[in-house]
Image (spheres, rainbow, N blue to C red):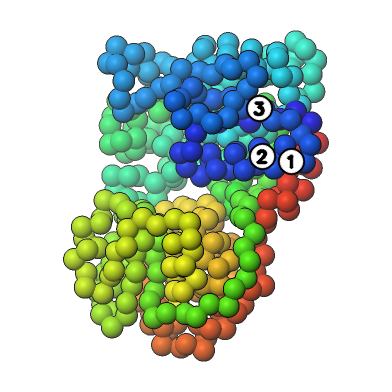
Amino acid sequence: MKVLMINKFLYPNGGSETYIFKLGEYLEQMGHEVQYFGMEHKGRCVGNRVDTYTSDMDFHGGPKISKLTYPLKTIYSKEARVKIRKVLDDFKPDVCHLNNFNYQLTPSIILEIVKWRKETKKNCKIIFTAHDYQLVCPNHMLNNPNTHKNCEKCLGGHYINCVNGKCIHNSTAKSVIGMMEAEFWKLKGTYRYIDKMICCSEFMKTKLDTNPFFANKTIAIHNFIDKVEWQDNEKKNYVLYFGRFSEEKGIGTLIKVCQQLPDIQFIFAGTGPLENVINDVPNIKNVGFKKGKELEKLIREACFSIYPSEWYENCPFSVMESQMYGTPVIGADIGGIPELIQAGKTGELFESGNSNSLKLKIQNLWNDKDLCKQYSENCRNIEFDSIDRYYQKLIKIYC
């Protein structure tokens, strides 16, 4: 089977890129042929046979003259249509697997795939993996970054609310462009050509299903995670948070709780805008951004970890990773987080944004070492999809 993996970034940049690289590699191991289409970039590490990509669109830098055309290019890209057609004509894929494409590649590539499919009479499926809420929310987050409040006002196609809330970079102009992009493709009905939409949580599926045209196309499959060898680790006396230090991650609420529990040692691993606030709390040790074996050691040796997010997370890797390393999680009851924690078995859930609820959960688990040990042992039997299990589900969608 020939699979064309489509994503605006073809270099390591975030979760969606990790997804396409690992999935593409595994598909090749299973005997499939995989090529990639997206933007050109100096860091690009995958590609296609005809070496054809769209021009890099740098919204934060680059020549001012080129930026003048960005508002139109973020809605519709003739360049993307022309260039993906060259790849389609050469590669002749059986599946076009869309990932993040809005603004840089634009949904115009879907129209070109459909046109090519019709002209060549090629039976090529269009599959989309939703990594965020881009098809139902112009700022992709269902969260107003100015108020730090979750927001569902655009669900049902009411995109004017993006402008009212200045939801894109607190800019009326950028929010207007976001609204126009969403309205344009809603009127075109382009997303109806997508055959299946893979949602990485049941929660995300419910949000996409608010669009009646999506409801019969969505399927929920949690993201895959690398297999981890079980180890019996000696726990140390600290509670761990690892991730970004920002408001939407619930760090403000967690800091407040840490200040109220001065006898408990907290370790924070990460970076972000609230770093200076964290550094002023005596019982928080900020070890900075960690990865690889250093992060693994921190996770394995923690009594438990905390995931206090206050926005609609979908399938946070950190929640799965912690339990795979034998460390229970106290997680916020928001988004897809509750789907990943077996409350009362491998961790606990608390009311998102409620400092009293979080404080109580931390105190109870910290003071009950036997329960914490039992939760840790229960993590031994937890099952998340490895890439081979994920592949078995995906191939049924492809076929």
Q: Which residue, as the protein is rendered here, is positioned at the far left?
A: 280
Indicate which label's residue lies in the foreground, 3 or 1.
1
> Going from the N terminus, do you reach mark 3 or mark 2 first?
2
Secondary structure beneath label 2: helix
10 Å crowding of disc 1: few (<14), some (14-19), many (20+): few
Residue visible at 43% across and 68% down in the picture:
298
- The answer to whether 51 is drawn above or below residue 283 in the figure is above
Residue visible at 41% across and 83% down in the picture:
366
Expressed as whole percent of the image width and height from the top left, the position of residue 296 reads: 49, 64
User: CA gap, disc 1 to disc 2?
Assistant: 6 Å
- The answer to whether 164 is drawn above or below residue 298 in the figure is above
Q: Is residue 78 left or right of residue 196?
A: left
**Label at residue 25:** 2
Secondary structure beneath label 3: strand
Residue 361, picture quadrant: bottom left
Residue ID for mark 3: 35
Quadrant where the N terminus lies?
A: top right
Tags 3 and 1 touching, CB below 8 Å: no
**Label at residue 29:** 1
Report if residue 184 is visible in the image.
no
Q: Is residue 134 left or right of residue 229?
A: left
Residue visible at 34% across and 38% down in the picture:
167
User: CA gap, disc 3 to disc 1?
Assistant: 14 Å
Tags 1 and 2 touching, CB below 8 Å: yes
User: CA gap, disc 3 to disc 2?
Assistant: 10 Å
Expressed as whole percent of the image width and height from the top left, the position of residue 323 reads: 55, 68
Secondary structure beneath label 1: helix
User: 2 or 341, which lies in front?
Assistant: 2
**Which three-letter amino acid code belongs to the residue tagged 3?**
Gln
Residue 295, picture quadrant: bottom left
> Going from the N terminus, do you reach mark 3 or mark 1 first?
1
**Which three-letter amino acid code belongs to the residue tagged 1?**
Gln
